Amino acid sequence: MTIPIVIAVDGTAASGKGTLAKKLARHFGFHHLDSGSLYRLVALGVMEAHGDPAKEADALAAARSIDPARGDDPAIRAAEVGNIASIVSAIPSVRAALLDFQRSFATRPPGAVIDGRDIGTVVCPNATAKLFVDARPEVRAHRRWLELSQVGAAPEESTILAEIVARDARDRARTVAPLKAALDARLLDTSDLDIDAAFVAALVLVQPSVENALKARQGG
Ligand code: CDP
């Protein structure tokens, strides 16, 4: 059996982990999964069903009926969906319902890059390479504001800042799969780096492990 090659990219809200993960996937020719989109789809499902995101039965029903192929739906990018995603994602059975899909994605040849909060700690603890991406909250709020302004009317930057700080706090405090760096993750602070510089820094951190794994797969 081919040993899976996985790059786990975890980090705080709006830290740029998704952009980095996409670029890494393109660089290595690997598949990319934004695991946050799964939780956002669960949130959207609860909202569409007029359910209560804090109620296990409502959140679990939504988790069991998501279509991961809808991960590109612009509706899931709204700030409110992100906040509700952080409520449903604290429910253990919701996380369990999404685990098989993520673990099976991780085995896709020739390799996978998955970004999220618990990829290096829970979903793929044996990942080939692990990154934990962070940036100062003000920098993250500004980047998210720019991103949202490009697709429509963005909330005030101060509102976005308050939301991502609250979301990180909730993600860190939950008992199941909290937001935290795996002990063997390489830390990357992108506060003072633009996208290209962050990508180069990320590549320096993950390339040796990925190349070793590719060589081992080819038998030396
Ligand atoms: O893009 P952004 O960093 O704002 O968030 P996201 O990655 O789309 O994740 C939205 C929310 O889903 C997070 O705040 C977490 O509560 C939850 N999430 C999670 O619990 N575990 C993951 N692996 C990914 C996301």
Image (spheres, rainbow, N blue to C red):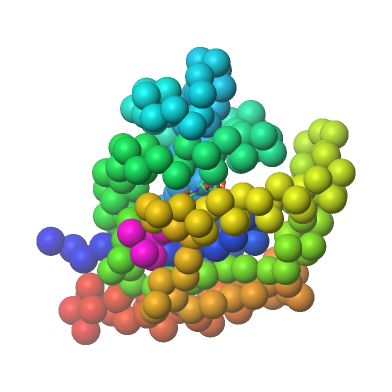
Q: Residue at horizontal 23%, vertical 79%?
A: 216
Task: Describe residue 155's horizontal placement relative to residue 97 as left or right.
Answer: right
Q: Is residue 208 above or below residue 171?
A: below
Q: How many marks?
A: 0
Q: Residue at horizontal 18%, vertical 63%?
A: 2
Q: Which of the 4 image quarters holds residue 76?
A: top right
Q: Nearer the viewer, residue 121 or 167?
A: 167
Residue 201 place in picture, x, y as percent: 60, 79
Q: Is residue 78 above or below residue 219?
A: above
Instruction: Give the residues drawn in magenta, as a range.
Output: 116-122
Q: Residue at horizontal 84%, vertical 49%?
A: 157
Q: Which of the 4 image quarters holds residue 15?
A: bottom right
In magenta stretch: residue 67: no
Task: Describe residue 165's horizontal placement relative to residue 71 as left or right.
Answer: right
Q: Is residue 29 above or below residue 64?
A: below
Task: Describe residue 128's horizontal placement relative to residue 189 as left or right.
Answer: left
Residue 167 place in picture, x, y as percent: 62, 50
Specify the quadrant that holds the N terminus: bottom left
Q: Residue furthest top?
A: 49
Residue 22 visible (yes or no): no
Q: Residue furthest left?
A: 1
Q: Residue at horizontal 75%, vertical 51%?
A: 162
Specify the quadrant that holds the C terminus: bottom left
Residue 55 place in picture, x, y as percent: 44, 28
Q: Which of the 4 image quarters holds residue 61?
A: top left
Residue 162 visible (yes or no): yes
